[in-house]
Amino acid sequence: MAAQSKSKRSQEQPLGRFDTAAREYVIGTPETPLPWINYLGGRDFHSLISNTCGGYSFYRDAKLRRITRYRYDSVPLDGTGKYLYIVDGDAAPWNPGWRPTRTPLDAYECRHGLGYSVFSSAKNALHAKLTVLVADDLDVELQALELTNRSAARKSVRIVSYVEWCQWNAEDDAANLQRTLSLGETYVEDGIVCHTTGYRERRSHYAYHAASVAVVGFDSDRDAFLGPYGELGSPASLRARTPSNSIASGWWPIASLVCEVTLDPGQAQSIVFATGYAENAEADKWTNAGVPNIATAKRVAAELRKDPDLVQRTLREQQARWSQLLDVFQTTTPEPELDELVNTWNPYQAIVNFHLARSASLFETGRGRGIGFRDSNQDCLGVVHLIPESVRERLLDLAATQQSSGAAYHQYQPLTKSGNDEIGSGFNDDPLWLVLSVCAYVRETGKLDLLDEPVPFEDTPASQATMLDHVEASLRYTSSRLGPHGLPLIGRADWNDCLNLNAHSLDPDESFQRAPMRTNGRAESVMIAALFVLAARAAADMYKGLGRAAEAGRYAALADDMAGKIESWGWDGDWFLRAYTHDGAALGGHRNDEGSIYVEPQGLCAMARVGEPSGLTARALQSTAERLACSHGIQLVSPPYSRYRAELGEITTYLPGYKENGAVFCHNNPWVIIGETQLGNGDRAMSYVRAIAPTYQSDLARRRTEPYVFAQMVAGTNAPRAGEAKNSWLTGTASWSYVAVSQHVLGIRPEIGALAVDPCIPRSWKRVLVRRTFRGARYEIEILNPRGVSKGVQRLVADGAVADGARILPAPPGAIVAVRVELG
Ligand code: GLC
Ligand code: GLC
């Protein structure tokens, strides 16, 4: 059964609600089911911040340049952040974000906006408004605290800040205490606390914490601040009311500043706290006096003092930038939940994913992973219309890690831009994703010159290879690694990392990603076969764009040939098979007692239109609706595996209904959605969108993760906690969902020589508006559906002229084109 429409999002949601006009999510209580986080900073300095001010910061690389500390499995959860304590007379100290004192507040609200968060809270007629954001050009996180005295009496208030430094390498910091506890150093000058661990030796970077007003004291040693067995909820120095002006020497360096304000009734005052990162040139590390040169920190602190409007101005600028960016694609449909998703939160999440890959979230500790090759290429798909230049740069970086054989490192490290095999290698789908992302760039921008850009292969740095050579190498990698049925060899695994058909692990201490692989493994992947069809057709398209018909024909033929193989060997009667094992057994078919249908080949074959004319895709998607879909979305596999099967690998380690073992693994739902739109099933496509999209969810307590972003997985029907989400924020779902909705449901699809407008919508929709900027021209598109169909452009009029079919030729940059589309 396809998922049904969820009940309308209600404005009375007790946990939170969308403020559409402000582009903010408003959280009404600090006690959310899980920390609900936001991301600050879009360039080099990144912070995570929860609705209780938990979180941490890093510079470019969450593992190697961790600035502040976070305890992932702390009790209670969300252990440590950048906290401000407010001490108002003799009353119990409190925090604007409630944690860590957890003093009950008289009022609390947290607004997560695009790259900033604002907390408004009150206690004893003292109101606090805390605005937190990152000033990208200063590499600094700013916390602007505005206190207002709404009582009838004068108030003397102390504000005590707290940040806990991480000793840069997050892995060592957490694990190698015998060393790190004798390294920690701080340096304090002019009321600025600097974290200088490692500065005496090979590091030329430091972090700092400063305030916009004069401080009356500080601490930089955690023991001094907390006291013996102290807790952040009631630090000794707060009780003692005297900062000890401590300097760290080993152990745990922190930064805490103490400021005082006196407020008359009705009076307000603002203080800004800054937590920043700075690098010095080797020759500039020390001053003549032999102390660390903290000129950058002093410059930023001086700026805070002399420019009281800095935070609000930065906020306004960032908001203006976001609204300009998001203006590239805006829609009005009959469903406000969809508008909320498409106009704000989905592109926001997609951009966060593009920057952070899978490094740092509440579920990704930022200690282990670089940027995944396949993940990053897919992340490009949903943001290329917004940040084409950054995507171009990323594509060149990714291609530069590719080998001349077409093989790709599974990951690369953003700080060094070099590939690493820390999480295994030999995932045979990896290279093909580059073809899709390069093609998406070309379709969006029309800039075929990307294909001529020189990018040497990693193992042949002197080669004259171009981006087009990388595209070809990727396709060759697959077509030269075929198994007994002529289907692509799976290698270590394909998109489904957990289907390890060539590495059978019996050692509980072994990582599935690195377990020894059988040499000459013969297991084959139908999923890679379908991806190849998609990629080869995309390559054919690019060759057509280059005017090279012979190559275009060659790739189209390769795609047709592979599609034929899938029809012969990858069809199970009612749906597509998933794979063949090394021994030639079919996997993901009706003969399998568990794992008898997998979603990936159904979605990808439908997207690649494998077997469409003969009705196979329609049957496969019908089976998907009947056997995999549930009210939370489409599950990855059914039935899930109930016991460990070494011959299948990691997928069978997960509890039934979790992760790859039969959760709604949201990432691949959009593939099915796209497939449904290609078949014209607008109602079913939208029912799947409603099932997974955060903006449609009403049972927030069950779901638990943030209601404004997609999660990687939602527990499937076989799990006791069905409907509970996990691994929110960092997931390929963000990009794919955006592509599915904007290009396939709303149907505004860039092509190399045109902009296609070919929607596939629910039959009940009468009218949809889309504003789309494409190659510098703006299209004001009105889609009318007087006959209540889902698909089929009856008539398309662009600037008064009737177009031939569903395509508009690109207008010159600056033009505004009125487009009217009638379905029927
Ligand atoms: C995770 C990985 C992604 C993989 C997926 C399925 O999301 O980041 O690369 O494709 O899991 O296993
Ligand atoms: C685990 C996860 C999978 C992820 C992989 C790589 O296998 O289950 O989703 O892609 O690790 O980190």
Image (cartoon, rainbow, N blue to C red):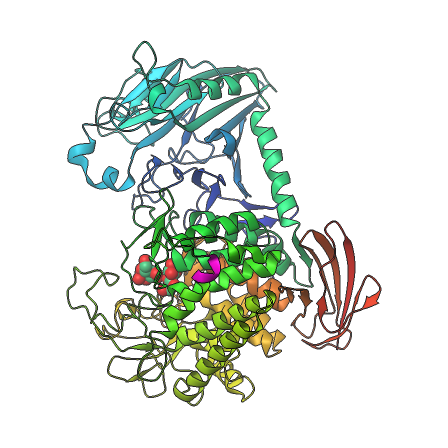
Residue 248 higher or lower than 13, as above or below? above
Q: Nearer the viewer, residue 30 or 197?
A: 197
Q: Quadrant of residue 529?
A: bottom left
* Residue 654 placement (x, y as % from top left): 29, 66
Q: In the image, ligand 1 is in what quadrant? A: bottom left
Residue 176 higher or lower than 755, as above or below? above
* Residue 675 placement (x, y as % from top left): 54, 75
Residue 15 in sight here: no
* Residue 614 placement (x, y as % from top left): 54, 89
Q: Magenta part of the protein: which range?
A: 466-470
Left or right: where 564 falls relative to 385:
left
Task: Give the quadrant of the C terminus.
Answer: bottom right
Magenta segment, prevailing SS (helix, strand or loop)? helix
Residue 511 higher or lower than 108, as above or below? below
Q: Nearer the viewer, residue 517 or 14?
A: 517
Residue 307 higher or lower than 661, as above or below? above
Left or right: where 120 falls relative to 635:
right
- Figure disc tally: 0
Residue 396 in sight here: yes
Q: Residue furthest top?
A: 289
Q: Quadrant of residue 190?
A: top left
Residue at horizontal 62 percent and vertical 40 percent from the top: 321
Residue at horizontal 21 percent and vertical 73 percent from the top: 646
775 magenta-colored: no
* Residue 617 placement (x, y as % from top left): 51, 82
Q: Residue furthest right?
A: 800
Residue at horizontal 68 percent and vertical 58 percent from the top: 331
